[in-house]
Image (tube, rainbow, N blue to C red):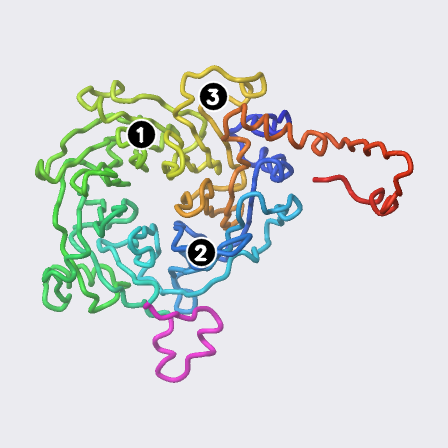
Amino acid sequence: LTALASALAMANPTDIHADYARWKTLVPFLYDWFAHHRLVWPSLSCRWGAVLERNEFKHKQRLYLSEQTDGSAQYPNTLVVTNVDVVKRRVAAAEHLAFEEESRSPFVKSWKKIIHPGEVNKIREFEARPSLLVTHTDAPELFVWDTETQPHRKTGASAADALRGSEADRAGEPSKPDLALVGHQENAEFALAVRRDAFEVASGGKDAQVLLWNVEDHDGGSLWRLSGVENVENAVRKSPSRSPRAAALEPRHRFKGHTDTVEDVAFHPGSSGRELCSVACDSALMFWDTRRGAKPAHAVFEAHKDDLHTVDWSALDDRLVVTGGADAAVKLWDTRKLGATGADCCVHTFALHSEGITTVQWCPDRRGVFASGAEDGYLNVWDANRVGAKSESPERARSGAPEILFQHAGHRTQVSDFQWNPHDPWTIASVSSGDGGNTLQMWRMNDLIYRAEEEALAELEKHKDAICGVKRAAPEEKEGEEKVGEERDAAEPMVE
């Protein structure tokens, strides 16, 4: 327990390069399971998909990645569908957690590639149908993909060898989306959310607007072809990478209130899609209600000291919203205080990152727990329930504020995206890109870290002898008892 507590207390958690070497030696202590996969190209987004099959020690699951390439015909930008093996809790041996930075994990297998019209900046999946994805790129349109029916597209040298004659001219041509969501007047690059229990999509863009679609309208008569609408034809000319003749859908609602680029959006988890919130480069956090019209229902105009990048609304406590910004701050908001202004709306500020926050997301497994990824390379896991609590031990006090539950230091560059696995508790997939390497990591922290202290101590007490390297004395033999198997027993290793 002392070793685990010391491992959590990073020497000075502001320099990822200084901490990385130390972190790597502690992986067997900190993680129940860890897998490192070197990517050929940077990935800006990662999302878990459906579980395909369950076995005794692991299960196979879809994982979706973006692939940011040089955009050439031979290496176009792609949406990558992979199959990954997720090892079950308390199965992985310590020696199996070791890795080399340039290694490619046997747990990750590429299954299909879809050539995307432009870079894939963000991916979101519909929980009701995880194979149906929505993507953002550097264009006003969003794209909807049915990954199960989309054909696999070869890229790289294999594609050039496979295509002959007229087919060679189509090398690198974007795949045709199943649906395009239109309505933004300028590029919409990052702000994207989907409802957990329906097929509604929210998006924000450089036009400072928040748009809301219902993909089910595709079957309800609102669908039209690009060739028949003048404004969409103009959008295609401005974005030549756009796949022609994709079916397109206009938004149901359009919200206006921000004065700069909208960076992220999130749905209220239990309002049937009527309520959502957004953050933008104008430093504002805004709340919207379809019943209140196009103007914000509530607005916090100076939510952060700099641009806001990311927001998430808790599914386990719909009063709580968390935001992250370029000011390196993570803030917790209580919607019951929205009548206040400025800092009075903020419940707490989590200050441990040293650079801008890229992503925040609530944990689906425990109320009050969320994680934040940042440009400093760290992925921090926080417990809002610990705010204001006294440190349980001197080791814990040295690790900083009591609300920091865990710090993942496996990415040496910006954490581009991450997601908690909805089908495997406390498991996270995270991606990073930059000078430290393009990496995908799948990991699950040791459960002794987040369990109640008395539970963790009771668990450790059961294995105290093995942990401390103490061999138990053999029981005394009764007089006259035959020493069966004595030689074999003496050679047996200590129980792990």
Residue where numbered disc 2 is placed:
61
For badge 1, the amino acid type reads Asp
Look at the image and give the residue range highlighted in magenta: 149-171
Pick whichever, 487 or 387, lies toward us.
Answer: 487
Tell me where residue 127 appears, x and y as whole percent.
31, 50
Residue where numbered disc 3 is placed:
402
Q: Residue furthest top?
A: 390
Kindly check if marks 1 and 2 are in contact, taking CB atoms under 8 A apart as contact: no
Q: Residues within 10 Å of mark 3 (few under 14, many from 20)?
A: many
Q: Nearer the viewer, mark 1 or mark 3?
A: 3
Tell me where residue 202 appears, x and y as whole percent.
22, 46
Judge whether 279 appears above or below 35 on screen.
above
Residue where numbered disc 1 is placed:
306
Query: If you read the primary sequence from the N terminus, does the residue marked by circle 1 or circle 3 appear first?
Result: 1
Q: Determine the image quadrant of residue 17.
A: top right
Real-space CA distance between mark 3 and mark 2, rounded to the nearest whole angstrom: 34 Å
Q: Quadrant of the C terminus?
A: top right
Kindly check if marks 3 and 2 are in contact, taking CB atoms under 8 A apart as contact: no
